[in-house]
Amino acid sequence: MPSGVLAHWALADPDALLDDLTQEEFDRNDGRMPYWATVWPSALSLADAVLAGPGLAGRRVLDLGCGLGLVGLAALSRGAHVTLLDWEAVAVELARASAWASGYGAVEALACDWRAPPPLAPFDLVLGADVLYEERNAPGVAAFLASHLASGGEAWITDPDRVHAKDFEGVASRAGLAVVSRTPRPPVEGAVSVTCWRLRRAAEGAPAAGRPAGAG
C-alpha cells in the first residue's frame, strides 16, 4: 500500500459494471472495458513512488488514465498542479470528487481519449498506471507522451509485467522517447512484480536539476 494516507471514492461493487456490460455498450465504447473502477496494483505502486519521491510543488502533473484518481491524489499531496484524464467520464468525476473531499479544491479534469486529446499545455510529469493492458495502447500512450512532455519533463509508467507491455520500450523509442530507467518495484497487493519506466524526450539527455526523478 502507499506509504501515505490517500482517501478516495470507490465503487462498492466494481465487478457489477463488467457483469452489466452489454455488447452494444462494448461496441459503442470502442471495445473498452470498465477497468477504471478497480484500483490496480500498478496504481498502488506508482502512488507509493510519488509519495516517496521528490516534492512536486508548482509542477504540472497529469494522471493519465486516472481511473479512481489514486495516483493523482498522491501528486496533489506532494504539491503538484494536477490534471486528471480518463476516457470514462464517471471515473473523472469520482477522482475529482475525491480531490475535493481531500481538501484540494477544484482540480482540472478531462474525459477524453488520449489518442485524440484536446489542446493541453505541456506537463512536467506524466503519471500512468497500468495503461498498457491492451496491445493497441502502447502506441497511443507513447505518442501522447512525446507530444505532451514539457522541456525537461518526465513520464513514469508502471505495469505489472503484462505481455502487452514487453515491447513498450521499442514503441517509445520510435515515438521519440528515451528510457531513463526501468526499475522493478516492490511487490504490492495483487501483483508479484511491477515495473516502472521513467521516460523523457529522446533529445533531452539526463534529468535537469530540480525536475522529478528517482521513481525507482
Image (spheres, grey):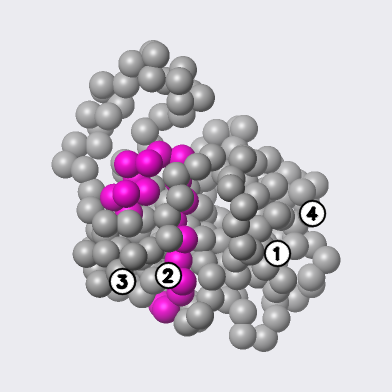
Point out which mark residue 176 bears: 4
**Residue range of the region highlighted in magenta in the rendering:** 78-95
Q: Quadrant of the N terminus?
A: bottom left
Vertical relation: 133 (above or below) 61: above
Q: Where is residue 142? Give x, y as percent.
A: 67, 48
Reading the image, the residue beneath label 3 is: 104
Q: Nearer the viewer, mark 3 or mark 1?
A: 3
Going by the image, does 38 lie left or right of 202?
left
Point out which mark residue 29 bears: none
Question: Are the residues flagged by discs 2 and 3 in contact, CB closer than 8 Å?
Answer: no
> What is the C-alpha distance between the residues marked 2 and 3?
11 Å
Residue 89 inside the magenta-drawn segment: yes
Q: Name the one closer to the observer, 127 or 41.
A: 127
Q: Is residue 199 visible?
A: yes
Q: What's the residue at 39%, 13% (across, down)?
A: 23
Amino acid marked by disc 3: Tyr
Going by the image, does 78 lie left or right of 195?
left
Reading the image, the residue beneath label 1 is: 200
Q: Earlier in the sequence, mark 2 or mark 3?
A: 2
Amino acid marked by disc 4: Gly
Question: Are the residues flagged by discs 4 and 3 in contact, CB closer than 8 Å?
Answer: no
Q: Mark 3: which secondary structure?
A: loop
Q: Residues within 10 Å of mark 4 (few under 14, many from 20)?
A: some
Q: Where is residue 31? Give x, y as percent.
A: 48, 23
